[in-house]
Structures are given as structure tokens and as C-alpha cells.
Image: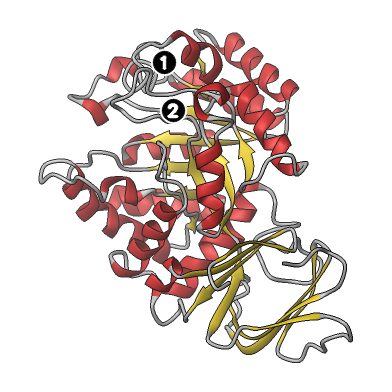
Amino acid sequence: MNQNSRPLALTNALLVDGTGAPAVHGATVLITGHEITAAGAAVAVPEGAAVVDLRGKAVLPGLIDAHVHLGGLGFDSTPAFGGREATDHYARPRTDALRHGVTTQRSLGDFLHDSIAVRDAIEAGALPGARLVVSGPSFQVEHGHPNGTVWGGDDACLREAARMPKSAAEAAAAVEGLAAVGVDLVKIIISNNAIFGPPRPELKMPWHLVEAVVDAAHAHGLKVAAHTETVEDSRRAVEIGVDDIEHLLLRAEDPHDEAALDDLFALMAARGTYLVPTMVAHQFHATADTDARTLRYGNRAVRRAYESGVRLGVGSDAYALGLHGWKLHSELIMMVHDQGIPAHAALTAATRTNAELLGIADRLGTVEPGKTADLLVLSGNPLEDITTITRVHQVIQNGTVVTDNGA
């Protein structure tokens, strides 16, 4: 609604600003052009401003999803993964996310040139949708996950979405190539393929290659996100220096060594390593011997990570069409209802902490003067009832209302 010609004043709102500070009742958020210029309880509304009364509504920073895939076409599709041509420039992932109040997504494993092109087109205003931070391809082992599982060895996927070095020198050269074309970070998969059957340790990324990827990425100023599936592999990855752990647990057994989990979280807290659990990936179609078991163990583990001071990010692992946006809502609801994390902390994780993880906290992630005006307006109070996160009233991106369910 704001055409950037005059200030927009959102008044009488509950402000949950993402900084971790207490919520402010009766707050005003002032937007001028693309930027937040004031936010709080004692904000003067300038003459000529467009005023929107948000009594009974909450204003938050736009949500950030720290783990998505843009090219997923569904496990029943052939191929199961694709790029711009197969997805109309990732139309549904970028627009579905935005209408659910997710204004930024981090793509952790997609076609290299396609994800960069769409990222840049969104930033330039040429395509609508949630902003993107992209890793391009992920580092994998040949015949491992996902090239030998979800993708079924598809040639285009192998070429555009995978890097499978055989030596440390090849790994470093591959990272250099990605940095040269402009990826925002590097993704590495440390998997023994237990997601799809019995563990196959021979298909796990060798540790000397993990070290080579991490060293090369850091030399280029790029963070490294590591897909891990066990406590032991997570600890080794943290010791090597990855910047965040994705998943931590997949198809988990109940822990035999509780102390190992506590030691891992103490190490992560001390080093500032982030954890993005994506527990919602196990919520649907759960069976007693796989996803449900992982949820029981995993939800307890995430709570312990929070209590240990680990920096929690929030990601949905939306891997196919129709999952982006609402699945992040489900992850937030799980954090509060199933993991016992306070709603205020969960919302801070999905905004400020995720912005810090993605390296965009200088302009996004909180409702503060000088930040870009990406905002989510909810009908109700998410601090009292986290399911309010699903009641999207408006989404504002770059100071303009792009979704309005109250019109």
C-alpha cells in the first residue's frame, strides 16, 4: 500500500521487534520509503503520513527461513529436482513463502546459476518473492545423499546442484569456483544415507575433505552449513570449524550417551556455532520406528541445546512445491509446544538470530530505525498463542504491502 511517496505509520500495534527486548504495547512503526525510520511507544506521526490502525494486531520482523530447497518437485516426480525451467523461476517457493510472512529464505542446495539468477532478480525487483541467500550446489559424496537417493543420479542435478571432490585440492578448487560466481555460503553434506535405509558409512564425506571445504570457504569469507545426522558427526564438524549444524539428528536412535549430547552443546555454545534443527521435517507421515522416534529424542535435544546457550536458528527444510512458508510456521509451533522454548525466544530465533546466521543482520531481522522495512503483521498476539503465527494479516516488503488479508 505504501508507494514510497509518503510515510506509512502503523499505529496501536503490539510490537515484537525481534531484538529480544520485551514486547511494546500500543506501538507505532514508521516507514519512509523502503526503511523503518522509527519504532516504539512514543513515536510522533508526521503530518501527511498514511496511518493504519493495527489495534489487536502484532508487528514483527519478516520471518526468515534458514533452510529451504527451491528446486524440489516431489519424490514421485521424475526428476525429483530441477532448476528455473522446471519450476517457472522457482515461482511457488518464492511467492508462497512471502504470502506466509517469510520475507527471506536461505537456499541450501539448488542449481547454481539458476538460484543466483533468481536471487538477483528478486533483489532487483524484477521478480516477486522472498529474498534469497544461496549456497548453490552442496558438497556430496558420489552415490550418496542426495545425488544417489532423491535425485536418482540425474545428470542435470549432478552438474548444477552437486560438487563431489575426490581430493582436498579438488575441494578447494570447487569452493573457489563457487565463490567466483557469487554464492553467499557453502553447504556440505555429512551423511551415511541412513535417511533412506540402513546406514552406509562408506558414503559419508571423508573428514579430510570436510576440512578442505571449510578452510577454503573461510578463506573466501564464506560460512559453511553442515548437514549432519548424528551427535558424533556433529561434534567432529564443529571441531573442524563449520559455522552451523543443519538437522543434527535424522532417523535417530534414543541416546546411549547423554553426556555426549551435553558436551556437543557446550562446545557449540563456546564456539558460537549455530544449530538449525528442522524438526518439522519429521512431523508429517511419522511412523513409530523412524520419524516419531526422531521427534521424541530430537525435541528433547533441541530443548537442551536452547538451555545450553546454543544459538538456535529456525528452518523448515521445505524440499518440494507447496511446503514453503507454512512449514516454517509449523517449526515455530513445534519449538514452543513440543520443545518448551518460550514463544518470544522462538520468534527471536526466526528473525534476529537467523539474520545473524545469514549475514544480513545489518539490514534485516529486527524492527529498528535504519533497517529495511520487511514486516509481518499478525491478527492476535503470538506471545500468548504461538499458533497466531498462521494468522497473517499483512506482509510488508521493502516498505510496500505485498500481502493484505484484511483488505
Residue 405 percent across, percent down from the top left? 53, 68
Task: State how many labels appear.
Answer: 2
Residue 251 percent across, percent down from the top left? 23, 38
Which is more toward the observer, 403 or 75? 403
**Marks 1,2: beta carbons within 8 A:** yes
Residue 101 picture quarter = bottom right
Decide: is 50 above or below 200.
Answer: below
Tell me the residue that label 2 is attached to. Answer: 189
> SS for tag 2?
strand
Q: Quadrant of the N terminus?
A: bottom right
Query: How many other residues sit within 10 Å of disc 1, few (<14), some (14-19) or many (≥20)?
Result: many
Which is more toward the observer, 71 or 4? 4
Q: CA distance from mark 1 to mark 2?
A: 8 Å
First in residue order: circle 1 vs circle 2: 1
The residue lying at 49 percent from left, 43 percent from top is 67
The residue lying at 82 percent from left, 89 percent from top is 44
Q: Quadrant of the C terminus?
A: bottom right
Q: Which mark is residue 243?
A: none
Tell me the residue that label 1 is attached to. Answer: 141
> Type of residue at label 2?
Ile
Residue 294 percent across, percent down from the top left? 22, 47
Which is more toward the observer, 334 or 240? 334
Q: Is residue 255 visible to us here?
A: no
Residue 191 picture quarter = top left
